[in-house]
Image (cartoon, helix red, strand yellow):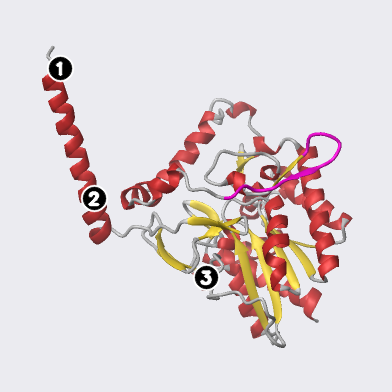
């Protein structure tokens, strides 16, 4: 077989693919089909966040879209810039967390941090809420953000919002776009040691995200959800079905096989919350830890104790009791709302809170803040 014809066919194929890519990239996904914008990540003060002063429209698999607005400090917020000087006669609240606080899945004013501000102002408490959220961050990184970013704004109240993947990821290093850019703890040895984050550096995923074609195929077709499903299958979810827990391996959007090291999780949680408590005493701010419930229990009416994921809620409750920290588990609020309205708090394709979830959580947290700290 002659090599030249094969090379010619390969060159023709490569040229055809390149031509098709150019058509999709610069015509189809620019002028015909709506495609999510891309916002780069950066490190400022060794804390990963978004490129400051940017704005994006994000499209979901069902065709809906949201706008996120990144302020001068790199946080998604209705406030164009966070001021260090205090606003007269105004209570400043800082909300710290991951993608739930970042809240890119809803429009900026619909995020639960903004709902807290709206509710408290409506109740006659002059309030401003600064939120500090970056997707993927674990509990230990919230401590780092508090020390190195949040405290300079001198909040009177700090709310730390927890979800179920915040715990094991506080000490386990995962492969990801910027998992090493989060503070972790090393639990080996007699003492717990903090592992400071490394500055974020763009990688190959960031390069792909610059292309409209990639963003459309990966995010808007639901491919990202399918890939996560495949990852679960590689862990033997189907093959080990008979060995699975009563309510399956995946609960509250986490694989419960990742939370079997309960003693390590307790260590990381107790250490982090005790350090946050020390900061609250030193800097004289009120502290509230809030947590997402096991939503499967909310929807089915089954006892939360039947779910392995609920062990994380119990660990948090025990730690907050131990260190005398206010704790709000959103289980009762969401259960009551769901029984009455039968509407779920997340998207059909994603576990993040939808507009309703943000509204219900925000109102519950605002009420708790008012009762505990503002009366």
Q: Is residue 306 left or right of residue 340?
A: right
State which mark lies toward you, 1 or 2: 1
Total count of labels: 3
The span picked out in magenta is 187-199
Image: 14 above or below 152: above
Looking at this view, is 21 or 113 the one in front?
Answer: 21
Q: Which residue is mark 3?
A: 71
Q: Secondary structure at mark 2?
A: helix
Q: Residue at position x 49%, y 38% from top?
A: 229
Q: Which residue is mark 1?
A: 3
Tell me where residue 241 appears, x and y as whole percent: 58, 29
Q: Secondary structure at mark 3?
A: loop
Q: Is residue 72 left or right of residue 313?
A: left
Q: Which residue is mark 2?
A: 24
Q: Quadrant of residue 191?
A: top right
Of the two numbered discs 3 and 1 on the same chain, state the one appearing first in sequence.
1
**Quadrant showing the N terminus:** top left
Tell me where residue 161 appears, x and y as whole percent: 68, 60
Tell me where residue 4 appears, x and y as whole percent: 12, 20
Q: Secondary structure at mark 1?
A: helix
Q: Is residue 80 left or right of residue 320?
A: left
Q: CA distance from mark 2 to mark 3?
A: 31 Å
Q: Quadrant of residue 323?
A: bottom right
Image: 234 above or below 41: above
């Amino acid at each position: 077989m002659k090599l030249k014809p094969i090379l010619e066919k390969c060159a023709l194929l490569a040229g055809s693919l390149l031509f098709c890519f150019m058509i999709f990239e610069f015509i189809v996904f620019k002028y015909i089909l709506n495609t999510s914008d891309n916002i780069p990540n950066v490190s400022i003060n060794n804390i990963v966040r978004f490129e400051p002063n940017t704005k994006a429209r994000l499209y979901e698999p069902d065709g809906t879209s949201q706008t996120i607005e990144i302020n001068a400090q790199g946080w998604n917020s209705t406030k164009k810039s966070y001021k260090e000087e205090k606003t007269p006669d105004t209570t400043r609240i800082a909300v710290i967390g991951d993608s739930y606080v970042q809240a890119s899945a809803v429009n900026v004013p619909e995020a639960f941090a903004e709902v807290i501000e709206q509710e408290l102002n409506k109740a006659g408490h002059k309030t401003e809420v600064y939120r500090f959220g970056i997707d993927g961050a674990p509990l230990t990184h919230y401590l780092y953000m508090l020390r190195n970013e949040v405290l300079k704004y001198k909040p009177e109240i700090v709310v730390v919002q927890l979800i179920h993947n915040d715990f094991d990821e506080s000490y386990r290093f995962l492969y990801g776009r910027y998992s090493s850019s989060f503070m972790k703890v090393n639990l080996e040895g007699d003492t717990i040691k903090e592992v400071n984050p490394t500055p974020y550096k763009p990688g190959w995923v960031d390069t792909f995200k610059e292309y409209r074609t990639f963003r459309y195929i990966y995010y808007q077709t639901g491919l990202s959800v399918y890939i996560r499903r495949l990852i679960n299958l590689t862990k033997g979810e189907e093959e080990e079905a008979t060995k699975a827990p009563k309510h399956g391996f995946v609960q509250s959007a986490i694989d419960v096989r990742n939370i079997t090291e309960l003693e390590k999780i307790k260590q990381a949680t107790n250490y982090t919350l005790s350090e946050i408590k020390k900061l609250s005493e030193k800097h004289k701010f009120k502290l509230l830890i809030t947590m997402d419930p096991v939503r499967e229990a909310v929807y089915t009416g089954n006892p939360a104790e039947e779910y392995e994921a609920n062990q994380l809620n119990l660990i948090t409750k025990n730690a907050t009791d131990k260190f005398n920290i206010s704790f709000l588990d959103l289980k009762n609020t969401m259960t009551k709302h769901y029984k009455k309205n039968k509407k779920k708090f997340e998207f059909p394709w994603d576990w993040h809170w939808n507009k309703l979830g943000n509204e219900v959580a925000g109102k519950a947290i605002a009420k708790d803040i008012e009762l505990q700290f503002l009366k």
